[in-house]
Image: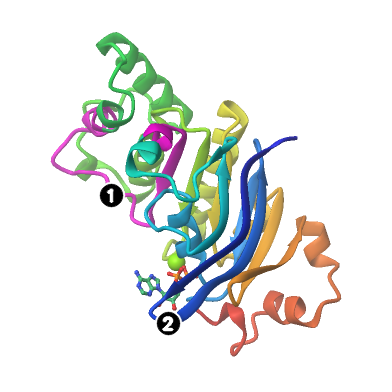
């Protein structure tokens, strides 16, 4: 499988703090890569570098064979339709219907689609997330779980090849967490999307991950499958897995 993202020796200082300190990471096309690590270790900063919201001090970022390390706003704009991001709270607009929320995203990311193509795409994406026929519903009438589904439908509507999820299950109860995990698995199966999921929920990581990486002090210090992780003899990893209150899972 080829790499859809290649990050090499990435460095980023923020307020005199070496947040990313030689981070190297490859993401394979179609895989779900889970990123774990303690709070404040640079997980969100990494995702921001993959969407052009932050810019590297040094190193390189290749996305779909394009060198994006020092890309201009215009170059980021070109590849933005390929990269969807789902923030923790989904940010669905209550002033718009579910369908209008999706049209809003399409107008930005796929302005050349015809109205019919947009309608068809929206119908398809609502099907994928289990909200068929709810185009004209107001998000305020939806349950929490359905809002999550709507936010995900909006994230996939422009057919991104890569979806970045920053702690999608933080603050959710176990049932909602399982729902988000199930959505990730479904979307991956149906659309072949590549996922990078930041989480600190190990149960969730185990359900969705093809590979897990651990970020620590600005670098990736572990890469492997869930099985590799469970069989690790590395003392730091063992501490991490067992959620030592002073360890990395303390957030
Ligand atoms: N815009 C910013 N300006 C200065 N420091 C920042 C900024 N964003 C993040 N940081 C710092 O970078 C470190 C990593 O943050 P972040 O990536 O948000 O951590 P997390 O792994 O919890 O997502 C933290 O120490 C945070 O305070
Ligand atoms: Mg974060």
Report whether 158 appears left or right of 60: left
**What residue is at 25 percent from the left and 12 percent from the top?**
115
Question: Regarding mark 2 in the picture, which secondary structure is present there?
Answer: loop
Q: Earlier in the sequence, mark 1 or mark 2?
A: 2
- Asked if 222 appears above or below 120 in the picture, the reply is below
The image shows residue 216, relative to residue 150, as above or below, that is: below
Question: What is the span of residues highlighted in magenta in the rendered image?
Answer: 78-104
Q: Residue 16 got which mark?
A: 2
Work out which residue is located at the far bottom of the displayed protein and give it. 246
Q: Which mark is residue 21?
A: none
Across and down, in percent, residue 34 comes to: 62, 55
Residue placed most toward the observer, 95 or 61: 61
Where on the image, by quarter, is ligand 1? bottom left
Residue under pointer 1? 91
- Considering every residue shown, the one lying at the far left of the view is 95
Mark 2: C-beta under 8 Å from nearest atom of ligand 1: no
């Amino acid at each position: 499988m080829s790499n859809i993202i290649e990050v090499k020796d990435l460095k980023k200082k923020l307020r005199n703090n070496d947040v990313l300190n030689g981070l190297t990471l490859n993401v394979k096309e179609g895989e779900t890569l889970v990123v774990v690590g303690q709070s404040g270790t640079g997980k969100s900063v990494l995702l921001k570098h993959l969407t052009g919201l932050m810019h590297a001090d040094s190193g390189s970022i290749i996305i779909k064979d394009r060198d994006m390390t020092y890309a201009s706003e215009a170059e980021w704009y070109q590849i933005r339709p390929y990269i969807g991001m789902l923030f923790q709270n989904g940010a669905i607009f209550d002033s718009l219907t579910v369908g209008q929320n999706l049209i809003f995203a399409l107008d930005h990311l796929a302005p050349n689609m015809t109205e019919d193509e947009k309608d068809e795409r929206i119908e398809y994406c609502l099907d994928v997330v289990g909200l068929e026929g709810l185009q004209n519903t107001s998000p305020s009438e939806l349950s929490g779980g359905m809002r999550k589904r709507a936010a995900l439908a909006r994230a996939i509507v422009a057919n991104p090849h890569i979806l970045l999820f920053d702690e999608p299950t933080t603050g959710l109860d176990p049932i909602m967490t399982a729902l988000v995990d199930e959505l990730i698995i479904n979307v991956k199966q149906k659309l072949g999307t590549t996922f990078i999921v930041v989480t600190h929920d190990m149960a969730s990581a185990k359900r969705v991950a093809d590979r897990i990486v651990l970020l620590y002090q600005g670098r990736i210090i572990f890469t492997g499958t869930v099985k590799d992780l469970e069989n690790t003899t590395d003392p730091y990893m063992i501490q991490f897995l067992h959620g030592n209150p002073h360890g990395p899972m303390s957030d």
